[in-house]
Image (cartoon, coloured by chain):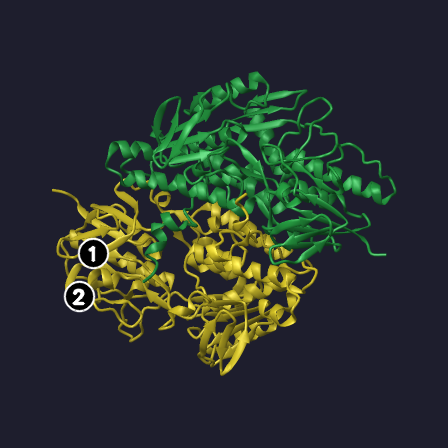
Chain colours: A yellow, B green
Amino acid sequence: MARHRVVIVGSGFGGLAAAQALEGADVDVTLIDRRNHHLFQPLLYQVATASLSTSEIAWPIRHILRKRGEVTTLLATVTVVDTDGKAVVLEDGTRVPYDSLILATGARHAYFGHDDWEKFAPGLKTLEDATTIRRKLLLAFEAAERESDPDRRRALLTFVIIGAGPTGVELAGAIIELARETLKGEFRSILPGEAQVVLIEGGQRVLANFKPDLSDYALKALRDLGVTVELGEAVSAVDDAGVVYGGKRLDAATVIWAAGVQASPAAKWLGVKPDRAGRVKVEADLTVPGHPDIFVVGDTATITMPDGKPVPGVGDGAKQGGKHAARVIRARLAGDTAGKPFRYKHAGDLATIGKRAAVIDFGWIQLKGWIAWWAWGLAHIYFLIDTKNRLAVALSWLWIYLSGQRSARLITQGDAEKAPVRESEKL
Amino acid sequence: MARHRVVIVGSGFGGLAAAQALEGADVDVTLIDRRNHHLFQPLLYQVATASLSTSEIAWPIRHILRKRGEVTTLLATVTVVDTDGKAVVLEDGTRVPYDSLILATGARHAYFGHDDWEKFAPGLKTLEDATTIRRKLLLAFEAAERESDPDRRRALLTFVIIGAGPTGVELAGAIIELARETLKGEFRSILPGEAQVVLIEGGQRVLANFKPDLSDYALKALRDLGVTVELGEAVSAVDDAGVVYGGKRLDAATVIWAAGVQASPAAKWLGVKPDRAGRVKVEADLTVPGHPDIFVVGDTATITMPDGKPVPGVGDGAKQGGKHAARVIRARLAGDTAGKPFRYKHAGDLATIGKRAAVIDFGWIQLKGWIAWWAWGLAHIYFLIDTKNRLAVALSWLWIYLSGQRSARLITQGDAEKAPVRESEKL
């Protein structure tokens, strides 16, 4: 008899964890992703702010799984799932049949009815997003150096981040340090340290998922760094001149979106009705109602734990979900079809504010300040995929720590409309 | 009296050397480049073949020159030089006045009357070129893994490099090692080691600027690695199916151009007639005939030494030219207007063939084999700009050497027409 075929779509934390948890099971696995790399998203903001280079936080998926002969990795885009015919359909029409399917395709940033804001306020989910933001940040300083009009110059040196969750807070801290430490003394017409970083949050505190006193600490740490934090302020407009919030306009050449995400289109593939954030509502065992052979995990799914709390959209939630799906599949193959419910265990929340402070909330212990920063750094190096990258990231961080210098300050990868560097390349 | 103003256009080896050689002189310097980084071009092929990451071989120009208060760095594109008004004109109309001008804008690859080949056979001069080639290489293996037609699959696994100078030879060696070592065991439908790397050269030997016995050694080393070397063969067509040479067609999904360069448009800016390769013919002191205040150095200029040999288009030629221009300017400021002639001293030629062999020709000594490889590696690490990058490159090389694994195997930065990964990002 043919082996049980598991198809996994998506190789983020959820999909990769599922593939790894299926090691040794009597299954053939096909892992499909439209990118060739697994990305360590928690450090993506460091690529966007020139601290790390792209290759330090991304690994070829097929390399990670090279020793697993039963795993086939495909670089492909899924267009639909044929739930009746039990096959995933790729963009070229290829059908990949499955016995069990795990959808772990993550989320993209979402603009909640303001899709036109995207071109002015990019979000941060992929390596290309990160290099695009890095490019925008660095180009703003370059343009300011050449700008003689003081208002226009001020707008070029104003950086707005919308949303004060971990990504927004980490970006704000990193950008102000970039301006005040890394770029110090390198310009002749501007003082990069005069750059204004404005973090706008609709809620009443930063890092709302942390304990209130850690939020307070993070707020103070941000303000001590020089970040302008605006709480309880909804943004009502984003355009090429800047943002409008609280009824007033702020001119800013750079606006970054860190306010919300929308699940990837797995619901559409399946033909089921998603929740408001595009997520698929799943059963207690993470399967899709009516499709016990299809699992949805991570940011693509929505599920509430018995304590009434939803599983948060963090990497560890996806990892645990992927592992759970693998466990259910293994149990079924062993004859146990009861379908154990998924129990998410929250390990904790971490966020850094610049390179000297961080907050950590493990539930049983809270840490803040430099000791939290070191714990955060060690934890992140530990979770990187391989030794080479652990050494490389440690070296990069040590260098920034000692010299303030970031090694990935490259303006590359121009998109068509704003790439003066590319135009004149034609002779 | 106002200080003497030196404007340098281009921050490659020539422009940067000129800026550095002007340290302490009684001048104000403006360095203009349309990129924000100085690029260590000799290692660009290692970015293209996934061994190094972009940030390991590029540095922000303004960071390199940050301690030189009299140097202003501008990210800008030059459109023309007003030789009468003595000003460089930027793309936004800004005029940058000069008393002395140094043009060091380098070269781009050239297709000698076949500009339509460029879209099928990209060349390697910029970081974007390198990531584009890296993307093409890695995507070819991914597409082959999904291809069922054997002819098409063979074409996907055929990599053609046109031109067997140092860049072509180094690319060929790196690509065959990528296929045979790095990717080994990571695919399920193909054997990456069966990839064919074909190096096509119009002349009768590889590395024609080296001594004949080193060329012979390099040829043998390439063939030992598994590269198919075709000498004395002119390419007559390049299209989306592959290449035609020696009257026969070779189907290849990936073709890389390493055959020739064309100087950047300095001649056009100046309104002078360039030579066939677009270079400005300069006087013995590197100034433009009739314009003693304008120097052209590096790949943008053409000049013949008293021994009848032209200055070769290598980094060291540009460096020495940039230093010479600075020296002439300093001498003039000191009242010596005689204009000493430029004397190029050839330090030597180096090229690697894979990660175990290299050839070095210093004139007084020739080296080949693994000892040459180590000398090559140490020399290149020495010439990198800063300590952080020396450590990072050494770590990357050590890792490749010990494990065969390349850490920058990322498929990113899709151009519009061939980026399935980007299309589906819209929800």
Can residue A114 be seen in the rendering of this structure? yes
Mark 1 or mark 2: which comes first in sequence? 1
Give me the C-alpha separation between circle 1 and circle 2: 15 Å
Image quadrant of residue A157? bottom right
The amino acid on which the numbered mark 1 sits, given as a three-letter code, is Val
Residue B288 appears at what percent x and percent y?
Answer: 72, 38
Does mark 2 fall on the same chain as mark 1? yes
Q: Which residue is mark 1?
A: A81
Q: Which residue is mark 2?
A: A289
In this view of the protein, which residue sits in the foreground, A391 or A233? A233
Chain ID at mark 2: A
Tell whether A178 sits left or right of B83. left
Residue B41 appears at what percent x and percent y?
Answer: 57, 39
Residue at image position (58%, 74%) is: A223
Most distant residue in the right direction: B335
In this view of the protein, which residue sits in the foreground, B206 or A374? B206
The amino acid on which the numbered mark 2 sits, given as a three-letter code, is Pro
Name the secondary structure under disc 1. Answer: strand
Tell whether A10 sits left or right of A256. left
In this view of the protein, which residue sits in the foreground, A358 or A186? A186
Image position of A13 with respect to B183: above or below = below
Residue at image position (47%, 44%) is: B131
Q: Which mark is residue B329?
A: none
